Amino acid sequence: MSIKEELALPSYRETVASCTCLNLRKANRAISHVYDEFLQPTGLRGTQVSLLMTVAREETSTMTQLADLLVTDLTTLSRNLKVLERDGLVKAAPGQDRRVREITLTAEGRAALERALPLWRQAQAYIKEHLGLEQWRGLISHLVQVAELTSPSRANAATR
């Protein structure tokens, strides 16, 4: 059977509708939109606030530590941090090992985060209200489990 014929099958619609990757990406875009709407007055996006919150929580982190915490690759993290560094919200400096860059929140970053947190809390409350507390708790629990999944190449390497 050709791919064109397979795509025309009713089972293909079911396959697409149950695709974990597709549904998580759609949900991610929807949630990101909610946070971005609430955070719009700050000029920050939800992803930027999440990154600032993580940097603030860790106080000083290496790029690798942040990438692991955020379950992202170093290229994406570097690109996102460059914008925050350009805006004076984070500082990247060489660590004790000059090959390692340490990321810290600046005073401007802390002030921006303090302005954003009340709006972030409003976005959280909006989502909880619309999902219901129990469903929201279940969602968070499931998302934590999903985030703990490793890539197949990492999983295969770990079992060798």
Image (cartoon, grey):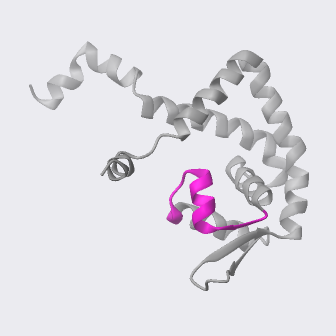
The answer to whether 96 appears left or right of 43 in the picture is left
The answer to whether 96 appears left or right of 155 in the picture is right
Q: Is residue 68 above or below residue 3?
A: below
Q: Nearer the viewer, residue 156 or 45?
A: 156
Let me know if residue 132 appears in the view.
no
- For the record, the magenta segment spans 59-75
Residue 85 figure quarter? bottom right
Q: Residue at x 23, y 25 (%)?
A: 7
Q: Nearer the viewer, residue 126 or 102?
A: 102
Q: Residue at x 22, y 17 (%)?
A: 9
Q: Residue at x 85, y 34 (%)?
A: 122
Counting from the top left corner in percent of width and height, residue 107 is at 89, 69
What residue occupies the far bottom of the structure in this picture?
98
Counting from the top left corner in percent of width and height, residue 22 is at 44, 32
What residue occupies the far top of the structure in this picture?
10
- Indicate yes or no whether the magenta region holds residue 23: no
Let me know if residue 104 appears in the view.
yes
Counting from the top left corner in percent of width and height, residue 100 is at 60, 78
- Indicate yes or no whether the magenta region holds residue 66: yes
Q: Nearer the viewer, residue 14 or 100?
A: 100
Q: Nearer the viewer, residue 94 or 80?
A: 94
The answer to whether 82 appears left or right of 146 in the picture is right
Q: Residue at x 45, y 45 (%)?
A: 150
Q: Is residue 64 above or below residue 12?
A: below
What residue occupies the far front of the structure in this picture?
160
Q: Is residue 18 above or below residue 118?
A: above
Numbered label tally: 0
Q: Quadrant of the N terminus?
A: top left
